[in-house]
Image: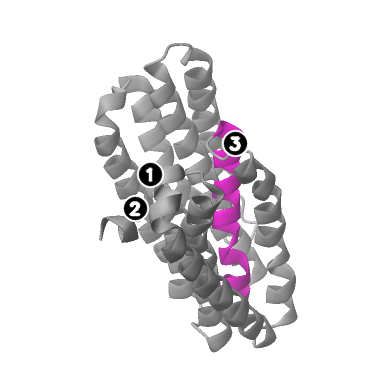
Amino acid sequence: MARRRLLLPKEHGAYAEIGFPLLTVLLLGVPSSGALLLSIAVVCVFLLHEPVLVLLGHRGRRVKREAGASAMRLAGVFATGALGSGIAGLWMSPPAAQWGALIPFILGVALLPLTVVRREKSLSGELLAAAALVTACVPVALAASLPMATTVAVSVVWAVTFALGTLAVRSTVTGAKGGAEPLRALTLLLALGAISAAVWISKTPVLPDSRAALAVLPGLVATISLMVLRIAPRRIRAIGWTIAASNLLTLILLLVLL
């Protein structure tokens, strides 16, 4: 059981980054066969990440020695599932969804070098990973018959939410080591700017689905609160649950506004 748990993704925030956008577009659109198959492909790629890290030795030599065989089997299963369901899903989806799949694919390919050289945990690596996970909802949304404007609105809202959340967590954790003030100030400035932009966009009738911009507010309020209150890094679990609660509110707002 211990070895099996090691083969699940350890980055808890990543579950939210992939789960909430997918859930949003599936609830807003029509869960067609193509959309469901593409969702399965996305989840398989996500679950493939941990076995690959084990095989690369990034989880330590002991883990690779003890769980290497299981990692190899799971990597084969998830890779086959991702390839099979991905090809079938794209074949059953409209051309727009096929082109939309290029966005997360390109971002994922860009993330590979950082993963290989163990720079995935850098700030740039975490932001790139968040972008790749969020945009995985784009082909699913288009396969679920969502309009392009709605797809863009959902993607941008979640991208801004998770990018600012990543900066907030990073500045909180870095605060224990010192030198976090520039990042904290930048995060606070970006969050305040994003709130102003969201309010302005929501009042711009020319843009389709402009009201959806207000859905970023829960995540931005959580980010600003973390920066102002200066929560101690030892309370990282409470920080995680706070961000998860704000993500749930963002999901509800998107469903109501769209």
The residue at the point 60 percent across, 58 percent down is 135
Q: Position of residue 216 (x, y in %)?
A: 46, 46
Indicate yes or no whether the magenta region holds residue 131: yes
Does the residue at mark 3 contact the one at mark 1 (Cβ under 8 Å)? no
| 3 or 2: tag closer to the N-terminus | 3
Mark 3 is surrounded, within 10 Å at the Cα level, by few (under 14), some (14 to 19) or many (20 or more) other residues, namely some
**Looking at the image, which is closer to me, 103 or 111?**
111
Query: What element does badge 3 sit on?
Result: loop
Q: Nearer the viewer, mark 3 or mark 1?
A: 3
As drawn, the label of residue 256 is: none
Q: Which quarter of the picture shows residue 104? A: bottom right
- Would you place residue 68 above or below residue 115 in this image? below
How many numbered dots are placed on residues in this image? Answer: 3
| Residue type beneath disc 2 | Leu
Dominant SS type (magenta) = helix
Q: Position of residue 51 (x, y in %)?
A: 48, 58
| Residue type beneath disc 3 | Arg
Does the residue at mark 2 contact the one at mark 1 (Cβ under 8 Å)? yes
| Residue type beneath disc 1 | Pro
- Which residue is labeled 3 in the image? 119
Q: Work out how far the residue at label 3 is from the one at label 1, CA to CA, in angstroms.
A: 30 Å
As drawn, the label of residue 218 is: 1
Q: Position of residue 62 (x, y in %)?
A: 40, 45
The residue at the point 43 percent across, 61 percent down is 19
Q: Quadrant of the N terminus?
A: bottom left
The residue at the point 31 percent across, 25 percent down is 233
As drawn, the label of residue 249 is: 2
